[in-house]
Structures are given as structure tokens and as C-alpha cells.
Image: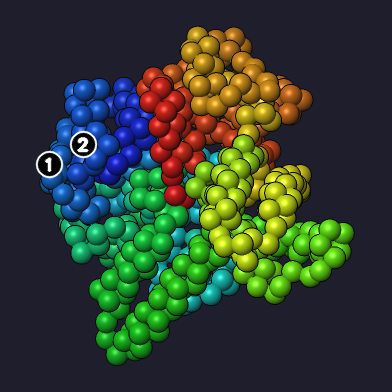
Amino acid sequence: MKLSIVIVNYNVKHFLRQCLDSVLDATQNIEAEIFVVDNNSQDQSVEMVQECFPQVHLIANKENVGFSRANNQAIDMAKGEFILLLNPDTLVQKDTFEKSIQFMDEHPDAGALGVKMINGEGEFLPESKRALPIPSVAFYKIFGLSKLFPKSKKFSSYHLTYLDDNEINEVEVLAGAYMLLRKTAIDKVGSLDNTFFMYGEDVDLSYRITQGGYKNYYYPETRIIHYKGESTKKGSLNYVIVFYKAMQIFVEKHFIGGVAKIYRHFLNFAIWLRAGLAILKRVVAQLMMPILDFIVIYSGMLLLAKYWEQAVLIAPYPPIYRYLFVPLYIVTWILCIALMKGYKKPFALHKINKGILLGTVAILLIYSLLPETARYSRAIIVLGAMWTTVAMNSLRYLLHKLKIKSFYFGDSSSRKIMILGGKEVHRVALLVQLNDTAPEKLLFSDLTAPFDQKKFIELLEDEKINELVFCTETVEIHTVIDLITQLKDHNITFKIAPKEPGVLISPQDVRTPIAEQEVEIDG
């Protein structure tokens, strides 16, 4: 047996299915075995594997035993000369395994190998190559010096950004999302440390491989798509806590002795400080838009109230109205917009407007129940709702026009879609439209005809396409990667229609319109 592939899954059924499809394509010429270890998923992942991939060795745990322990369950059973740890939220090129194994065969000093990883938006993932988090490296990373000086060998050593992303290099740490291991190296240094429930286990194993006399190689001659955390919800606060806790375990395990004890205490302090800053950053990012909305709406409401005082009432409103009632109106609108998923990106104006309408109805209903002395002005509520609608829509339109990447429209009224595939493009076209109302423009490009990438990109630009759907039943993963990397700065949303019927996958979510189900992704 040449290759044993180990995939640990937890509640990402649709990602797992398209991952397995790509794995089967890539193992056609390799003697390989595939293990899926499921950590008690509740999304019918186990049933899907049993039904669709009977050739896969399935280990269905009755509880979530963690990433390390789950991998070790399969590693203990693996018969391959090489063992690949692979995340379920990945897509591999058809040549990925063959090229990786060939390099390992040609370099007997290689204990482990990682490849160039691209996220679902076409961006290079810097964790494809890393250094050990020794005190100085961790200090530069935690306090932002690595971002300030990305080409400095001294300051940017954590993600090795001074190295060319397209050059083969020996590195200290590889990512667990794709880690090809030599079985003899694992037999010598041991498998994953079960102390690491999630995160940090790849750092620990990479370090032990080098301590065992082997080398870790970054190999960018082949690439994979890694949705970066769809299997582990990297955008969540829980991720931050668990990740930095894992770093602390690594420090406690490997930094011992006199001077090292001082380093260890310093690094522990720095890790928890960085964890706190990371949590604060995520909280601020989530609240930024609602706070901005509040400021804009409140400013307009005060002007409306002042105008109404002078033009209609000929008397001022009491302070309690300005400083209590008006803010409560605005908070109600914002909460209702959040309830309608109006703050979910990409912004959908119809969701925002539904939220404002719901909030207005709620405010007027509560207003009707208040005593006469607390009913200051129904007109201001209605005018305020109108102002809120204009302000929020205009603010998002402005941010969209400024081409700020985090703020772009996702409304079907502005959707200009290109579907790239073969005979299945018409089936996928129906699927795309079931996800929302009819797009403004829907075009097809048939891969069964001669395909010119340069002309295709020119067509996308001419037609102002903002949504590109790949049918991976026909389109090979290397073509997907080529296009999304070239188009990553074009404000285009990339989606994949996998072989699985009725499913659309994007970096933000998985949509199954037949069941009217939308699975959101934190990340």
C-alpha cells in the first residue's frame, strides 16, 4: 500500500462529500486506502459516507474525541508507506498526491510534506509554511511586527513571508490541513499527541519530526483549496481560546529548564494577551456595522425631531425622548435587522428592509400600549423608519462603491452570474436560481468546447460578472484554483456546484435550496 489518507470529520457533510470526490479522482493511479473518522457528527455525515463511499474505511465515534485522537485511530490501522492527514474542507488537484509522493520518494530525508494552500476566495494561506513559535518568533507575531515587516527574515519568520510562496523550501512547521507523513518517521517519533484536542498538534508533530532527524518540506508544485476552518469554525471566539490554549500546551511541553522557564512565562503571558486582543477584534468586527448604523440613524432622528418641533409642535421634546425613546427605537430596528440576517455578509438589502419593516411594526405596537404621556409622536416613528431605510441602504451602497472588500452586495437584483461547466450547466442554472430570485444576468461557458482562460477572464470583466459558479463534475480543481487566484481582486463571489445534486458551496455557506436549508460558515 502506497498511501493512507486520513480525514477527520465533524458536522461538515457537504464539504466532506466534495473532498472525497476530489480524493477519489486524485487516487486513480495510486494504491491507496481512505479513512474517514467521524467525531459524532449530527448532520448525517456517517450515513452519507456509508451510502455514497462504501470503499472508504469509516470509523464512527460515539463522542467527539478530538482531532489528534481521531487521527490516531486511523493511523494505527493505516498500511500505507505514506500517511496523509487531510481536512474535510479541502479540495485536491488531480495531480496532488502523485506529485507529493514523487517528491517524498526522491527525498528520503523528508519526514513530512505540505503543499500550497489557497482559500475559497483565491488567496494564499500563509499557514502553508510556518516556523516554530519560539519566544522571539512568537513575540514578533503576537505584537504585529511580522505584518509590519513581511519581507524581513527576522520579523516575519512565523509565516516565513520572506520566502517565495512558489518555491520549494525546508520549513519547521506544516499545517495539519494537508500533512503527508512518512510512515517510518511516524513509527520513530510517534503519532499525534492526544493532549492537543484541536489545534497545535501539527506544530508539535512537525517539531518532533525534525527532532527525529527528518526534514519538513513546503512543496508548492501542486495546490489545494482549503476553506480554512469550515470544519472547525475559525471565526468563532471558541476557536481563539482553543487555539491559544494549544500554543500554551506546546510551550509547556517543549520549553523547559532555567532560561527557558523565563521564556515560557513570557510566552504564556503573550499568548493570553494575544488571545484577548483577538477576541476583542472579533467582537468589534461583529459590532462595527450596527454601531455605525446607530450613529447615522440617531443623527438623522435628532434632526427629524428638531424639524418636527419647529414646524409642527412649536415646542421641544423632553430630554427623555431624545436620550431614551429614540435610542430604543433604533435598537429595535437593529435587532430586527439582525433577526432577518441583515448583518450577514454579503449584505442583502431585502433582508435589511424586512428587518426595518418588522422593527417598525414592533415599535408601533408597543407605542400603542404605552400611556398617553409616553406617546410622543407616531409621525417621528414613521419618518424615522423612512430615514433608517434610506440611511442604511445608502451607507451600504457607498461602502460597496468604495470597493471595500468586507462590504459588498449580495442581492439577486445585482447578481450577474457565470456558470462554468459542461452538460450539467443547465441543471446548475436552475439550482442557482432556486437559491434566490432570478439574477440580472445568467451566462454559461461550456468546457466541452476549447477553453481559453485569458479570453474567459476578459469575458467576465466585459460582462461585469460578480458571481462565478464552477461545476466540478466537469471543471478540474486546478482550473478552479487558476481562475480564483487570478480573479481574487475582482469582487467576484466564487461558488462550487459539486457532483452532489442540489448543493452550492461558497466560502460563506453551503446552500441546499431543495430543502430550503442554509448552513452558515464562521470564518
Work out whether residue 445 or residue 464 is closer to the camera in this orientation and state it.
464
Question: Is disc 2 in contact with disc 1, using a CB cutoff of under 8 Å?
Answer: yes
Query: Picture quarter containing residue 144?
Result: bottom right
Q: Quadrant of the N terminus?
A: top left
Q: Nearer the viewer, mark 2 or mark 1?
A: 2
Relative side of 303 to 504, left or right: right
Q: Position of residue 181 (x, y in %)?
A: 28, 47
The residue at which mark 2 appears reads as 35
Work out whether residue 42 or residue 136 is closer to the camera in this orientation and state it.
42
Q: Which residue does the image show at 51% across and 16% down from the upper left? A: 430
Mark closer to the chain start, 2 or 1: 2
Give, as a three-letter code, the residue at label 2: Phe
Query: Picture quarter containing residue 418?
Result: top right
In this view, which residue lies farthest toward the front?
372
Give, as a three-letter code, the residue at label 1: Met
What colour-coding does the image apply? rainbow
Relative side of 465 to 437, left or right: right
Secondary-structure class at tag 2 = strand
Q: In this view, does 451 lie above or below 210?
A: above
Q: Is residue 36 above or below residue 189?
A: above
Q: Is residue 469 visible?
A: no
Q: Which residue does the image show at 29% across and 90% down from the upper left? A: 258
Q: Position of residue 188 (x, y in %)?
A: 17, 57
The residue at which mark 1 appears reads as 77
